[in-house]
Structure formats: C-alpha cells, structure tokens
Image: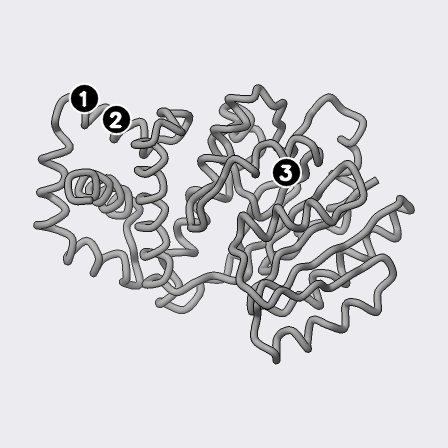
Amino acid sequence: MISVLIPVYNYNIVALVTHIHTQLQLCNVPFEIICLDDASTTDVTNENDTISKLECTSHIKSKDNLGRTNARQYLSKQANYDWLLFLDADVMPKSDLFIRNYLNYIESDYEAIYGGFAYHKNVPDSKYMLRWTYGKTHEQISAQERNKKPYKVIISANFMIKKPVFSIINSQIEQKGYGFDNYFGALLKMKNIKVIHLDNEVYHLGIETSETYLNKKKKAAETLLTLYQSNKIGSHQNDLLHFFIKLKRYRLHVFFSMIYKLLKTPLKNNLLSSHPSMTALQLYRICYLCYKDLNP
C-alpha cells in the first residue's frame, strides 16, 4: 500500500520513525518504512539502529554519501509498494492523522500529493532567524494558496507520489546539489502530473544557522541558473527565475550584478542579524543570480 522513505544524514530519526510507525499501525494497511543513512557518523548511525526493531522497518547504511537526489532514487528502488511517502529526517507530523490524511487520496486521480511545511511559533535564537523567518513567510502556506499554482511551492520534505512517476521525474535530476525542488516541480508540470496540496504539514525542526542557510540559498540560485542556461527549465512558476529572465531580456541584469558587488556586505549583515528582512533576501538572491550569470 505505502512505503515511507526517509533519507538521513547526521540526524536522530528515532522519534519520527516511532511516531510514523504508530500511525501506520493504527491505519491497519500494508506498509514499510525504509531509512537510508547517507554516510552519517557512527554515533548517529548507532542511535538510529534501534528503529530496526520496529515491524516492517529497515535501516540501511551507506558508506558513501549519495546526496539527496540519489538517496531518494535508491530508496524508491528498494520500495515494495506503489505509493511512496518521502519525509526528511528533521521533520515531525503536525497531526496524529497525518498518515490517514494521505491515505485518503490513494484512490484519487492525483499522482503527487504535497502536505506542506509548518514552523513552531517560538522565536529561535538570533543565529537561526533567517531560516525561521523565511520558512514562516515563504513555506508555511495554506493548501488553498498552494493549489492556485500547484507546481510553485514544491517542498520535497513531505510528499507522497506514485512510484512510477517519481522514478521518471527524479531520474532526470543528474547533479548533486541544493535547490532541485524547483526543477522537480518544473518536471511535474512538463509531464502534466496531477498534483494536489493538502493542509497536512510537518514541523521543520532542523533549522540551520543563518550563515549556513544563506550559503544554501546561493547554491540554490546557482542550481537554478545552471538549469536555465542548459535549457532544462523555463520561467516555470518560480518568481526568482521569472524576474531574472525579464531583467536579462532588457539587459538590466548588468545593473543588478553591480548592485550585488556594491551592497553584498550590508545586505549580508542584515540577513545574518536578529531581524533579517525578506525583501533584502530577495534582493540579495536576484542580484547574486545576475552576478553569477555574468561572472561564471
């Protein structure tokens, strides 16, 4: 019926897997939980080993770091059921009916189902503010809003998809790196995959420091630029890429590249502060994208 697949890297997943396992048992359906430890440290691997004692649950250990995309591809090949539920290691379902809410759509015409992301209300330490603020403003979005543009907010930390569909889409992502959710969404759209979004969120628990997250956003911009330059993705429903294409059409990307060189330090200082501006982040991202386009 359903295979729950969790790629893991240096994160304790015992609480998550135990909670998911309980929900699956209560639903009384055929299931399996497969976790792939992607070359984590020995201490973390040993802690996570306890999940193997749970019924229909396996903990696979990889000596080599496969990366997010390849880890998911590997997990999908190990799965025995037609529906795959992918979860990141650093999440926790918001509802005790989390699994049931997904199972309600197994007999529907939809081929990919996205549950959404949520963040706790408690304000974190200042060094985590950028990730938390971005998540609250750009990821914690209702299903009603997400369904208006179903291929735009594609968060791979919490989604269920038919196995053949996933194999076709994910196999086209050949590179390692950060920021491929946009490409996955673009491929879903290109293949006319029927997508629906639910209010079936998971809490995002593993929030990175602002410095780490800003570097990830830069890598994501580079990924987006590479995909665009290789004609693998058009404007799609991604606002950043859509704006970049407009700027480039009128040669305004040259001006925005200059802004990056002039303002990158004050913008970065704001983004790493205790009150990061999301407007500053968007400006930083588009200017960095233009800069990288002109300075490969």
Q: Nearer the viewer, residue 191 or 148?
A: 191
State if disc 2 and disc 1 touch (CB < 8 Å). Answer: yes
State if disc 2 and disc 3 touch (CB < 8 Å). Answer: no
Q: Left or right of 278: which side holds 72? A: right
Q: Residues within 10 Å of mark 3 (few under 14, many from 20)?
A: some
In which quadrant of the rendered view does residue 232 lie? top left
**Residue marked by disc 2:** 245
Q: Nearer the viewer, mark 3 or mark 1?
A: 1
Q: Left or right of 244: which side holds 96? A: right
Q: Residues within 10 Å of mark 2 (few under 14, many from 20)?
A: some
Quadrant location of the C terminus?
top left
Quick check: 240 above or below 149? below
**Residue marked by disc 1:** 249
Residue 266 location in percent, x, y?
Answer: 15, 56
> What type is the residue that disc 1 sits on?
Arg
Q: Residues within 10 Å of mark 1 (few under 14, many from 20)?
A: few
> What type is the residue that disc 3 sits on?
Asp
**Residue marked by disc 3:** 199
Residues under labels 1 and 2: Cα distance? 6 Å
Q: Nearer the viewer, residue 247 or 140?
A: 247
